[in-house]
Amino acid sequence: MATRQHHPTTRESIRKCNEAVSRRFHVTLAVYKTIKATTQLLGVAGGVYAIQQGADPMTALTIIGAILVGPEILEYTIANEGHPRSDQED
């Protein structure tokens, strides 16, 4: 017989994310999201500017991709911190 898993509400999820970000980086979730969005915007703008100035487009696009995906991987890691993987269930 399968057991039901508790699905947290949005407020609980946000509270847990805020606690995890505060514990790891000593900033609130709102500050982290603001820094993330600003960094991504500046990364894309800098990449476009570099291409316009004659930089290799593939190199610039690779760096832009890393800037955009890096924080998303960090968020995924924080969100799954302390949770067992679902494919390891009995």
Image: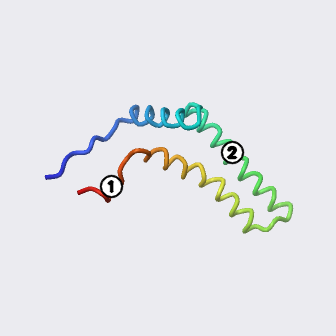
Q: Where in the figure is residue 87, as x and y percent of width and height?
A: 32, 59
Residue visible at 48% across and 32% down? 19
Q: Disc 2 and disc 1: Cα gap in Å?
A: 32 Å
Residue type, numbered disc 1:
Ser
Q: Residues within 10 Å of mark 1 (few under 14, many from 20)?
A: few
Q: Is residue 36 left or right of residue 18?
A: right
Secondary element under disc 1, as helix, strand or loop, is helix
Q: In terms of image quadrants, where is residue 58?
A: bottom right
Residue visible at 49% across and 49% down? 77
Residue visible at 67% across and 48% down? 40
State how the image is colored: rainbow
**Residue 43 or residue 77, whichever sits in front:** 77
Q: Residues within 10 Å of mark 2 (few under 14, many from 20)?
A: some
Residue visible at 23% across and 57% down? 90
Residue type, numbered disc 2:
Thr
Q: Is residue 4 left or right of residue 69?
A: left
The residue at the far left in this view is: 1
Q: Where in the figure is residue 10, as x and y percent of width and height?
A: 39, 35
* Label 2 vs 1, first from the N-terminus: 2
Secondary element under disc 2, as helix, strand or loop, is helix
Q: Where in the figure is residue 8, as x and y percent of width and height?
A: 34, 37
The vertical placement of 59 against 88, above or below, is below
Q: Which residue is mark 2?
A: 39
Q: Which residue is mark 1?
A: 86
**Residue 17 or residue 26, whichever sits in front:** 26
